[in-house]
Image (spheres, rainbow, N blue to C red):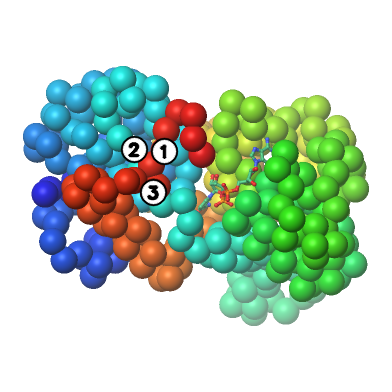
Amino acid sequence: MKIVFFSTKSYDKEYFEKANKEFDFIFIEANLDPITAVVIPDGAVVCCFVNDAINEQVIEVLKSKKVRLIALRCAGFNQVNLEAAAKASIKVVRVPAYSPHAVAEHAVALLLTLNRKTHKAYNRVREGNFSLERMTGFDIFGKTVGVIGTGKIGATFASIMLGFGCRVIAYDPFPNTELTEKGIVYYPLNELLAQSDILSLHCPLTPETHHLIGQEALQHIKPGALLINTSRGALIDTLAAIDALKSHRLGALGIDVYEQEEHLFFQDFSDVIIDDDVISRLMTFPNVLITAHQAFLTSEALEQIALTTLQNIRSFNEGLPLANEVTLNKN
Ligand code: NAD
């Protein structure tokens, strides 16, 4: 069986080749779109990542190529038109859990870097500048941390912050009893926003959570709060966040994901003019830290992603139940 990988990077190749025993791989660097899809051999499995927009048009081409399985090598599936896939009788599988620690720890890295300005210290010291001017941070100990979405990653992040000596509170329509047993209290969203010194987003992107942190929510946040998003870019209305940064309502913003990231992330634009004025504006703030969707990128996570993806494909091949299938009504 042939598996065609889209949006392939060197680390995908390395970890998938290490985990492979039986499949033929075709690695393609380009994103999946209606044009790149034409190279797919008939009946192959298509393996995609977060920014491969698997819309109705793409599904149509996949159907004409007799593709029966889309294997996502990620947890999120907001990039797939599940209705169109179901209509075309194409099954979709994903990797629901690989390393919640990888993503939760990256959220902590963003928080610590933004707060203690280690990125600036690194550059200053390398240039022989040992001044501490404008480097003051705050103690994280004793602060209130609001966690939005307490599934696998949110719960891991919440536990780490308990270890820092924070008061951790949460918002999730489905409270996690393991966290309530640890003393974490759930609040309605606006109450959580008003109480939190630090906010971290860990819920999926759905029609309900699109722009969850928009103009209205930003009016409820505690003035000066620090906001971290390692989940999906469109949870935040970026233009509203820019306004909140300009008015100092939002104290700092750390993001690993961005609303329009599919046009930028995972590519090198260091020699060209970036024509996205919104991210360009964000990049000018001294209190904004952006990483390019790298929270998942640990060797443990890559190993698990490869193993689970290949097991998903093996199960499909052998007609076994698909434990990690994504359907319209499930998940
Ligand atoms: P999960 O399914 O275990 O948990 C998601 C939680 O969000 C659930 O508890 C759910 O009840 C809650 N939720 C759903 N709707 C909500 C709402 N309206 N408000 C608040 N909470 C809500 O998922 P996970 O494994 O913890 O992953 C969380 C998200 O992290 C994924 O959806 C994905 O978008 C993102 N992610 C990012 C990276 C990265 O590299 N940056 C990697 C993996 C996952």
- Looking at the rendered structure, the kind of residue marked 2 is Val
Spot occupied by residue 250 in the image (x, y as percentages of width and height): 80, 43
**Dot placed on the residue nearer the N-terminal end, 1 or 2:** 2
Is there a contact, CB below 8 Å, between mark 1 and mark 2? Answer: yes
Give SS at disc 2: strand
Mark on residue 323? 3
Residue wearing tag 2: 92
Q: Nearer the viewer, mark 2 or mark 3?
A: 3
Is there a contact, CB below 8 Å, between mark 1 and mark 3? Answer: no
Give SS at disc 1: loop
The reply to whether residue 28 is in sight is no
The reply to whether residue 66 is in sight is yes
Q: Residue 174 appears in which quarter of the rendering?
A: top right
**From the viewer's perspective, is 141 left or right of 243?**
right
Q: Residue 121 appears in which quarter of the rendering?
A: bottom right
Residue wearing tag 1: 326
Spot occupied by residue 111 in the image (x, y as percentages of width and height): 70, 61
In the depicted structure, whether residue 17 falls above or below residue 154: below
In the depicted structure, whether residue 298 falls above or below residue 149: below
